[in-house]
Image: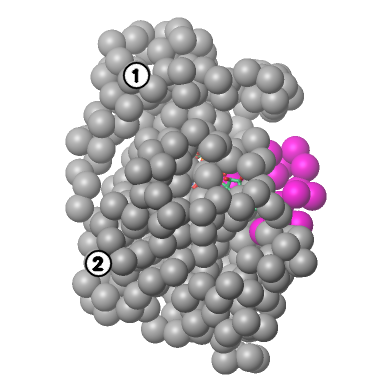
Amino acid sequence: MRLLVTGGLGFIGSNFILSMLKTYQDLSVTNLDLITYAGNLENLLDVQDYGNRYTFIKGDITDKSLVNEVVSTKPDVLVNFAAESHVDRSILDASAFLKTNIIGVQTLMDCCREYGVKRFVQISTDEVYGSLGADDPAFVETNMLKPNSPYSASKASADLLARAYHKTYNMDVVITRCSNNYGPLQFPEKLIPLMITNAIQDQELPVYGDGLNVRDWIHVLDHCRAIDTVMRDGKSGGIYNIGGSCEYTNIDIVRLILTKLNKPFSLIKYVQDRPGHDRRYAMNAAKIHDELGWAPSIDFEEGIDATIKWYIENESWWRKIKSGEYLDYYEKWYGNLKK
Ligand code: NAD
Ligand code: TDX
């Protein structure tokens, strides 16, 4: 199988590429990534072991002539991870989100159609469904899309575009919608790596609002295995929820991390809430389980222990990130949230 992966230098994409190259000997990957602030060549240093089974191309998924050139090599499948992915940054400025997450997807799908790529896999998110109340049933694939942030609105737009290309052009498109991922190589702007690295540095841990918002956590490798399953066996035009069935409040996650690192709860700092903050996400993943036989396999306690260990052992990786642009962003965002 010849895979074209877009956005493969980010958190989930790099974990996906590593696990695919390791699992399948008869598979090669071309990775097209712009190397934005979130893309990191260091994430895939280990792929040198795979020789010519891995090719990297630097470029923008909104650049039609480049994408045409890359797609003209006719990969079997395109898996699109490329996106602006951080809700808080979308609140500061939505422009790049609309460009990459919507126009980028259109560009990729147009080129795939032109060159007859057999399948397009769009990596989407639970956030397209909006927010749940404490007693609401978990999201199912048939729920209405009710995005609440510029980020989730851009991802929902891409999902609708993917649906339209399937209906209009009979294009073979599958969409995966996953809950919150954690694991190695996650950029330290997201809750879990932010809290682990701030705690290691004895810095404040900023908790939004009352800290009682709920997320459904899944280890990134369980997500990658689900994507592989949908990519191979998912029904054309199908949408598949992926989740860990593992709901935690943010404050419980933060306290767990501090406890495991043997750091005091006094590092916790409640700050102003994120505008439009979704209260709760929970995924009903019965469809992917019943139709394709996938279920998560990594226990949260074990996964979080391994993740904390990874951040302790890879301090130079995240210390390099936590400089320059990151510090400017941090000041701009958290500077406004002080209570
Ligand atoms: P990330 O921010 O870590 O990585 C995004 C990658 O896309 C980076 O390597 C970046 O350089 C690249 N990129 C950005 N704009 C690009 C462009 N215009 N052209 C080419 N490459 C570009 O994101 P992530 O957390 O790995 O998420 C990957 C995908 O999964 C996203 O589509 C996101 O919406 C989705 N998702 C993420 C989560 C999560 O918990 N992180 C959960 C569900 C879905
Ligand atoms: O400093 C913080 N303090 C805090 O309380 C940060 C960064 C987050 N939070 C809260 C906000 C959320 O309730 O933690 C929760 C998780 O926040 P994020 O890590 O920013 O993730 P979330 O907004 O839930 O979105 C994530 O999951 C779905 C990913 O970033 C998206 O890319 C994915 O689509």
Instruction: Tell whether label 2 touches label 1 (CB within 8 Å).
Output: no
Circle 1 or circle 2, nearest the eye: 1
Q: Residue at x 35, y 8 (%)?
A: 264
Q: Which mark is residue 18?
A: none
Q: Is residue 295 visible?
A: yes
Mark 2 CB lies closer than 8 A to ligand 1: no
Task: Confirm whether the magenta stretch covers residue 87.
Answer: yes
- Image coordinates of residue 275 in percent, x first then y, are 67, 40
Residue 276 appears left or right of 74: right
**Is 66 situated above or below 325?**
below
Q: Residues within 10 Å of mark 2 (few under 14, many from 20)?
A: some
Quarter of the rendering containing residue 193? top left
For label 1, the residue is 312
Which residue is label 2 attached to? Answer: 294
Local SS, label 2: loop
Residue at (62, 61) in percent of width and height: 155
Amino acid type at mark 1? Ile
The residue under label 2 is which amino acid type? Trp
Residue 314 vs residue 290, the one in the foreground: 314
Residue 220 highlighted magenta (yes or no): no
Q: Compared to 9, does 109 lie above or below?
A: below
**Quarter of the picture holding the N terminus:** bottom left
Instruction: Give the magenta part as a residue range.
Output: 85-102
- Quadrant of the frame with the C terminus: top right
Mark 1 vs mark 2, CA separation in Å: 31 Å
Along the line of sight, the residue nearer the viewer: 8 or 294: 8
The image position of residue 134, as x and y in percent, is 40, 51
Q: Residue at x 55, y 76 (%)?
A: 74
SS at mark 1?
A: helix
Q: Residue furthest front?
A: 52
Report whether 10 appears left or right of 221: right
